[in-house]
Structures are given as C-alpha cells and as structure tokens.
Image (cartoon, rainbow, N blue to C red):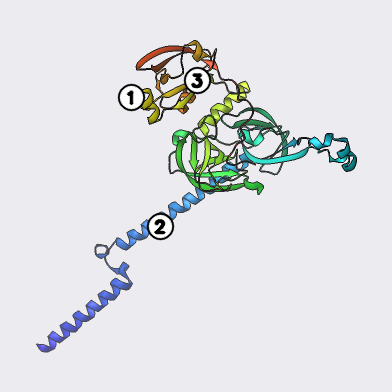
Amino acid sequence: MRRLWLIFAQATTVALALLFVIVTLKPEWLPPSRRSPTVITLQDDARGEITRDAAAAHGFREAARRALPAVVHIFTSQQVRTERHPLMDDPMFRRFFGEGLDRAPRQASGLGSGVIVSPDGYILTNFHVIDAADQIEVALADGRKLKAKVVGSDPESDLAVIRVNADNLPAITFGSMDNVSVGDMVLAIGNPFGVGQTVTMGIVSALGRTHLGINTFENFIQTDAAINPGNSGGALVDAKGTLVGINTAIYSRTGGFLGIGFAIPVSSARLIMEQILKNGEVIRGWIGVEAQEITPELAESFGLPDVSGALIAGVVRGSPADQARIQPGDVLLAVGEREIRDPQEMLDVIAALKPGEETAFRLRRARNVIETTVKIGRRPPLAGSRRQRTEDR
C-alpha cells in the first residue's frame, strides 16, 4: 500500500511540474478554455496604438505633400530715399567734401510667404508682406521665379491678393472653420528667415482671439506651431492638408518664436479675398463714431447698471451717426438684433453691414433706453499703412 502511495505522489508531482512547464513555456498547447487572454489583449492594444500612431504620421506626411506645392516664397524690394542732410546745402561744406556726399537711394528687401488659391496664378498673402513694395517676386515650389503684381489689398485685416502670369498652378484646398476645434493638430508652412520651405507642427491653442492690437479687425486662430519672420502669409493647414488659416503674426519679446502664433481664419480670409477679387477692395459699413470700452469705474461714474455695450466717445460731424443724432456719452447696446458687448464687437458688426441700408440701433442715454435708425455709410480707406508687426521682414 505504501508503495502505491509513493508511486501516486511521484506521478502527481511529475504531472504538476509538467503542467507548470507547459503553462509557462507553451501555453498554446493548452485547451482554449484554460488560456488567459490578458496578455494577448494587452499586445493587441499596444499594436493598435502603434497602428494609430503610424496612421497619424502618414497622415501628416500626406497633408504636407498636398499643401507644400501651393505655398510660395515672396521676395519684395523697394527704393528707400534717405533725407538730404542740411549741410549739403552749404557751399563751403560741398567744396571740401565734394558732390558725392549726396545720398543715393538704397534698396530695401523683404521676404514672406503666400498661398496659391487658384490654378491661374492668384496668391493670397499678408498685406504687410507686400506693403510699399516696388517689385514682387514669387518663388514656386518647383523652383520657378515669377514677377507678381498686386490685385488688391485690405490693410485693416492685413490681407492682400497678388497674381503671377502662369497657368495650371497647384492650388490649395480650402477647409472649413466649422471643422476646427481647440486641440486639433495643424501644420504651419512658410519660408522662415529665408531658409526655404519649412513645415512645423502644433495644435490649435485657441480660437477667436481679439483685442491684440495687431489689426483693426481681429478674429485670430492661436497656435503653437512654430511661426517665424518670413512665415507671414503662409498656410496653416489641418491634418488633411486643407487650408484653415493664413499665418500672420507672433507674440514675442525677443523677435523669435515663443509658442504663441496667430493666423487669420480661412472663413475670414476667403470672404475678404472674394471681395478683393470682385471689387478690388473690401467694402465695409461705417457710422462715424469713436467708441471705448466701459470699465467698472466708467460704469460707476456714468451710473450704468453694467459694463456691457460700447461707450460713444466721439461722433464725426456729418457722419451717419451724427445724422441719426447719436451723441457722445451714449452707450450702444444693440445693432439690429445683435447685442453689443464691447467696441470690438461693435466695429465688427457695423463693418459687416451694407452701405446704404438702414439699421435699428438701441442705445442707453442717461438712464433711458432709446431706439434710432441709422443709414449705414461706407467705411473710408485706412490712411497710410499699418506696418507695426510682431513679426515681419
């Protein structure tokens, strides 16, 4: 009996040892009901992540491949004449130092980027890239260099349309701002510092940035995709390679990129471009007032219930606002059905109105709310050019 027990114990020990070896080294030999799926599931998840990462990387390559041919380099030049020194009018000074001290005009050059928007040579860029340029040269992605002329510009939004004499050019595909959200991956394409075509990657950091003091009309996409001098006018594209913005400016205390860049949304750029192509300029509404933001201190001094609205600080004599008897000290509360929260919104809403149409305005005067009708005028062109840029030539 004892011999049988020893044989059983030894057989059991050998069987358990064999089972341990199989489970450890060859689990696939076991019947399906006795396998643990945990390790296999984890490996599947890991493989799935790798597959998604590879797909994303391939998607960015495809996006760059689609967009790069439509982004061009823009080189500009202008004659800059320095002021004549008063001593040059002194005969004695000229006798000793000669006539050659008259200063000849010098050549100033600049660079930027642009986006081909049609196969027949129309290119969208920033106004400050081509502002005051005597000559504009465009370098295409295929190496060709072509002279360009200005079709039209809009200094207040910092956009311009130029054209080169060429056909069958690779045009960008326009995206939709409805598909753009904070956190989306974007690529910035341009010619930073003149080193050549460059692609940088980042995300959409914010939408609807205003009150930056960059342009008169502001509604920027903020991104951390690297934008540097020379990128102005280049393309901001999504992961599919479609245009979502025109790179315009950066926030910087050093002149270099600090992670905050701004692009004009494709929706705004397209509307302005279409007006330039149709009219040669952008036509906006205007009523002739100067407005300022209502601070808590102003609200208290004027006896206002809150800080919403735009405080009318001045009225141009003979303007539509003057004819509608709008007065300094009034607070604009609404234009038509649109509530006004601040002067920037007032500017945007009025600019979107058509000159000649009559629109209802709601204002607060003293402690009373009044209604008036204003016949919208046409916004006069901006005098001079806006060249104070956070990133430029």
Examine the rendered structure and indicate whether residue 289 appears above or below residue 105: above
Q: Can the viewer see residue 124? A: no
Q: Name the residue under label 1.
A: 305
For the N terminus, the quadrant is bottom left
Dot 1 alpha-carbon crowd within 10 angstroms: few under 14, some 14 to 19, many 20 or more: few
Q: Which mark is residue 23?
A: none
Q: Where is residue 132 in the image (x, y as percent from the top left)?
A: 69, 32
Mark 1 to mark 2 CA distance (whole Å): 61 Å
Q: Position of residue 60 (x, y in %)?
A: 52, 47
Q: What residue type is labelled 2?
A: Arg
Mark 1 to mark 3 CA distance (whole Å): 22 Å
- Residue occupying the far right of the picture: 95
Residue drawn at (66%, 46%) of the image: 194
- Whichever of labels 3 and 2 marks the residue nearer the N terminus, that label is 2
185 or 132, nearer to the observer: 132
Q: Pointers 1 and 3 in contact (CB under 8 A)?
A: no
Residue drawn at (49%, 40%) of the image: 222
Q: Mark 2 points at which residue?
A: 47
Q: Which image quarter: residue 105?
A: top right
Examine the rendered structure and indicate whether residue 192 appears above or below residue 377: below
- Residue occupying the far left of the picture: 1
- Residue occupying the far bottom of the picture: 3
161 or 357, nearer to the observer: 357
